[in-house]
């Protein structure tokens, strides 16, 4: 079952995406990078808001486009997890020491922090190379996204066969799998047969495809109609 992840940039969008049927609510600031982070106080407010709903979708939060520095990454993950979200998403870049960052986060994962590694299809020649380390560290999931939002969507950088190989490898390790990266409405029927656990959207949910603009209820409804709906597990 493939679920719909909606990246939201404000508390207003959080409520809009929840009412629009998003299966995962992803707290991300699109104006500050591929994985732009919300301020920690705002993440806490989002968690408190969602807890008031009788049924809620899981919340994930990004930590920002951090350098591959072990201490900085571990510290930001700990701070974000302490806000009460269900998943913390980190970006792994080829430069620096991404494998070392993964290893440094293993103790947090063993203590129950649910971490999702984001690998960038436009930066990694073979993003699957880190999956054994990610699985060994006890991460909850791994997904493919794009770092350069102006360089085209996911399918411009990886073929469907390459995506299928990544998903099969990640799924084989028991990881939650996801695909994102400036996905359009037209990408949905091409990607659904690959059966990722979720498809992530921002650009397609905004008016005129402006990912830095406001979420558009009509665009959200169109994407929700395209991705088969499933009951929300709070």
Image: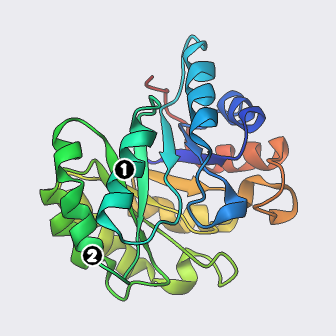
Rendered image quadrant of residue 207:
bottom right
Rendered image quadrant of residue 153:
bottom right
Q: Position of residue 29 (x, y in %)?
A: 66, 53
**Which is nearer the eye, 110 or 198?**
110
Residue 211 in the image: above or below residue 57: below
**Which is nearer the eye, 229 or 73?**
73
- Left or right, 119 with respect to 175, comes to right
Identify the disc placed on residue 6: none
Identify the disc placed on residue 75: 1
**Which is nearer the eye, 36 or 194?**
36
Residue occupying the far front of the picture? 71
Q: Nearer the viewer, mark 2 or mark 1?
A: 1
Q: Residue at x 17, y 66 (%)?
A: 133
Residue 122 in the image: above or below residue 72: below
Asked whether residue 142 appears in the rendered view, the answer is no
> Along the polypeptide, which appears first: circle 2 or circle 1?
1
Give the residue at mark 2: 128
Q: Residue at x 60, y 14 (%)?
A: 53
- Left or right, 144 with respect to 97, comes to right
């Amino acid at each position: 079952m493939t679920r719909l992840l909606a990246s939201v940039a404000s508390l207003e969008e959080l409520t809009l995406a929840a009412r629009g049927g998003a299966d995962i609510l992803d707290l991300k600031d699109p104006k500050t990078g591929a994985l732009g982070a919300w301020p920690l106080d705002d993440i806490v407010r989002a968690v408190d808001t969602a807890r008031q709903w009788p049924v809620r979708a899981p919340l994930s939060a990004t930590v920002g486009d951090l350098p591959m520095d072990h201490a900085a990454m571990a510290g930001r993950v700990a701070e974000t997890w302490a806000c009460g979200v269900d998943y913390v998403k980190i970006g792994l870049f080829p430069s620096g020491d991404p494998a070392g960052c993964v290893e440094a986060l293993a103790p947090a994962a063993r203590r129950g922090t649910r971490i999702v590694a984001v690998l960038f299809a436009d930066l990694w020649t073979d993003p699957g190379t880190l999956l054994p380390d990610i699985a060994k560290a006890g991460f909850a999931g791994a997904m493919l996204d794009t770092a350069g939002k102006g360089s085209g969507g996911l399918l411009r950088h990886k073929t469907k066969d390459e995506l299928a190989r990544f998903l099969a490898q990640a799924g084989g390790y028991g990881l939650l799998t996801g695909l994102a990266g400036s996905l359009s409405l037209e990408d949905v029927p091409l990607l659904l047969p690959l059966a990722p656990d979720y498809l992530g959207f921002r650009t397609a949910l905004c008016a005129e495809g402006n990912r830095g603009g406001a979420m558009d209820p009509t665009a959200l409804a169109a994407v929700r109609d395209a991705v088969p709906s499933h009951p929300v597990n709070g």
